[in-house]
Image (spheres, helix red, strand yellow):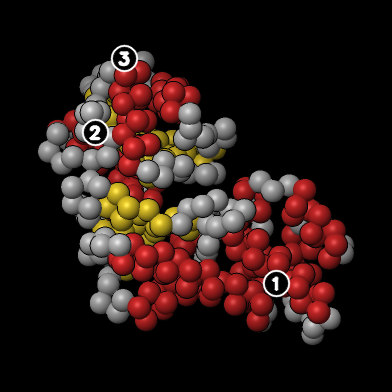
Amino acid sequence: MSGVLVGLDIGGTKTAIRAETPEGTLAWEAVEPSGDWSAGPVAAAARWIEALVGRHTPAGQTVLAVGAGAQGCDTEQHCRDLADALRARLGVPCAVTNDAALLVSAAGLEEGIGVIAGTGSIAVAVGRDGGLSFAGGWGWVIGDEGSAAGLVREAVKVALARDDAGGAPDVLLPLLMDGFQVTAPAALARAVNDNPAAGYWADRAPVVFEAARRGSADATEVIETGGRRLAGLVGTLVSRGAVATEVVTGGSVFVRQPMLFHAFQDALAERHPRLPIRLMRKPPVRGAVVLARRALDRLVPVPGDEPSP
């Protein structure tokens, strides 16, 4: 069988893998849970990717190059180190970047800002030279504003604060209690604290949007604040000198929940009215295949494809 270029989009919840021929024809693709994925230590992460590629590559098919966008690869050095480790294991050109950066290449751009709001959130600026700048992405316990987990965290805090204050009833609290399968506010607090896994919190994010659709002022404010904070990440990158030719957004919450995207869009338009915004609906893993192609062709330097000093 002929050789293929393999791309991976490794997110906090699921991983997409896609293989294309050098001519751009889809060879195969798959999606599976990210499971025990961790971007560090680098050696273990490289083994994880190698095993995934091996499971899905048909016998007799040659992998020509690999491109990966991975949650947790949050510095340029980390991307280079993982690409080096992966190259050593696979023996082919490899490029690694953050999963949000895939949005830029998937959109056919060489530079821009990618913003992901999925299980977690982060904003990444990609320069024409392949350089990366990061904002946010601190994890769901203290950050990941506007993400599924982050929205649930903030919604629970607001709902419990209203209950403590004896405020007028808001539909957000009973919907959250239903979502976490508890019957009292104190039990809601325990349920959230006793299982602080990102996926466990993120799975309840639709409850926040349902509450907003039912007229919850608290849920609406949580969503709008999430959108503003995501827009603030873009502003942080711009203030640090990122070339913002276009902002490309993606991730499950942006794609499935228009309320968050519109809140982000409105907030960004206030701060940067001339900055184009695109919602990426096609799979970002296509951007990982672009990275693999660039790594093979050596035409455009990308993080992880430079030789280590």
Q: Which residue is mark 3?
A: 60
Residue that label 1 marks: 158
Crowd class of label 3 (few under 14; some 14 to 19; many from 20; radius 10 Å): few
Query: Where does the image place residue 307, in percent across and percent down from the top left?
Result: 21, 28
Marks 3/1: CA–CA distance: 56 Å
Circles 3 and 2, Cβ within 8 Å, touching? The answer is no
Q: How far apart, in angstroms, are the residues tagged by discs 3 and 2?
A: 26 Å
Please identify the quadrant where the N terminus is shown. Answer: top left
Q: Determine if residue 21 is in view.
A: no
Looking at the image, is mark 3 or mark 1 nearer the viewer?
1
Q: Tag 1 or tag 3, which sits nearer the N-term?
A: 3
Badge 1 density bin: few <14, some 14–19, many ≥20, Cα 10 Å: some
Q: Position of residue 21 (x, y in %)?
A: 23, 32
Contact between marks 1 and 2 (CB within 8 A): the answer is no
Residue under the point 31% across and 59% down: 113
Q: Is residue 199 above or below residue 231?
A: above
Under circle 2, the secondary element is loop
> In terms of depth relative to the viewer, which is nearer, 294 or 73?
73
Mark 1 or mark 2, earlier in chain: 1
Looking at the image, the residue that sits furthest to the top is 60
The amino acid on which the numbered mark 2 sits, given as a three-letter code, is: Asp
Q: Residue furthest left?
A: 299
Q: Is residue 172 left or right of residue 121?
A: right
Residue 265 visible from this viewpoint: yes
Q: State the residue at coordinates (31%, 34%).
A: 80
Between discs 3 and 2, the one toward the N terminus? 3
Label drawn at residue 305:
2
Q: Is residue 67 above or below residue 201?
A: above
| Badge 2 density bin: few <14, some 14–19, many ≥20, Cα 10 Å | many
Give the residue displayed 59% in from the left and 56% down from the top.
142
Q: Disc 1 marks which amino acid? A: Val
